[in-house]
Image (spheres, rainbow, N blue to C red):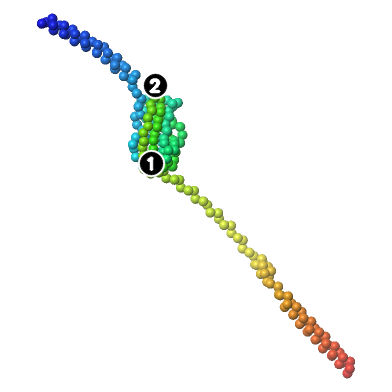
Amino acid sequence: MHAVTRRAARVAARCLVVPLAVAPLLFTAQPAFAHTDLVTGSPAEAASESRPPQTIKLTFSDEMTSRYAKVALTAPDGEPGAAGAPQVTGRTVTLPVKPGLPAGSYTVGYRVVSADGHPVTGSYRFTVEEAASAPAPTPTRTPTPTPTPARTADASRTDDASSTPDPPLPVVAITGGLFLLAAAGVSVAVTRRRRARHGS
């Protein structure tokens, strides 16, 4: 009976030796199989924003390399919404956004590579409820009218004199004819008086 018990104990001990020897290897190998993931996004996935964001910020579990960082923003009308290239600072990748974007559903797509060589690819969506307000129009300046210089009294008199119409031609002719008739009558009267004096 004691022999059977001893054999069973030896077999159990041998069975435990292999798992205990392999366990440290498993714990050591876990970091090698670790995968870089997206930790947070701003705006977040499925978020509803009142206005279009000015930037897209993606934070990952590992530091990123700026050389292989690719981030894109697609507007509701299918046009790209990025205003430049993404900037990498440690584990955060920031993408500038164009101003004046419309309301609707936006898609953020990214493909980055961590500092230890792990690629990360993914995408998500968020919603903007209101479009960005358009910039106020620049007011146009109305030119100030130049004051007209007042006319002098002499100039006004000259204008009045020059504006007086000349008498019509028939009136001049009639007046000249009457003057000639009067002159002839006076001449006849003078002649008669002289003759009367000589006759007397």
Q: In this figure, which residue is indicated by the disc labeled 2?
A: 116
Q: Secondary structure at mark 1?
A: strand
| Residue 42 versus residue 188 in the image, above or below | above
State which quarter of the image contains the C terminus. Answer: bottom right
Query: Mark 1 packing: few (<14 Cα in 10 Å), some, or many (20+)?
Result: some
Residue found at the very far bottom of the displayed protein: 200
Query: Mark 2 packing: few (<14 Cα in 10 Å), some, or many (20+)?
Result: few
Spot occupied by residue 111 in the image (x, y as percentages of width and height): 40, 28
Q: Residue at x 38, y 28 (%)?
A: 121
Q: Amino acid at mark 1?
A: Gly
The answer to which of marks 1 and 2 sits earlier in the sequence is: 1
The dot on residue 104 is: 1
Q: Which quadrant of the view contains residue 152?
A: bottom right
| Closer-to-camera residue (9/179) | 9
Between the C-alphas of marks 1 and 2, the distance is 37 Å
Q: Is residue 33 left or right of residue 167?
A: left
Q: Amino acid at mark 2?
A: Asp
Q: Which quadrant of the view contains residue 98?
A: top left
The dot on residue 78 is: none
State which quarter of the image contains the N terminus. Answer: top left
Spot occupied by residue 167 in the image (x, y as percentages of width and height): 71, 75
Residue found at the very far top of the displayed protein: 3
Q: Secondary structure at mark 2?
A: loop
Residue 29 visible: yes
Q: Which quadrant of the view contains residue 20?
A: top left
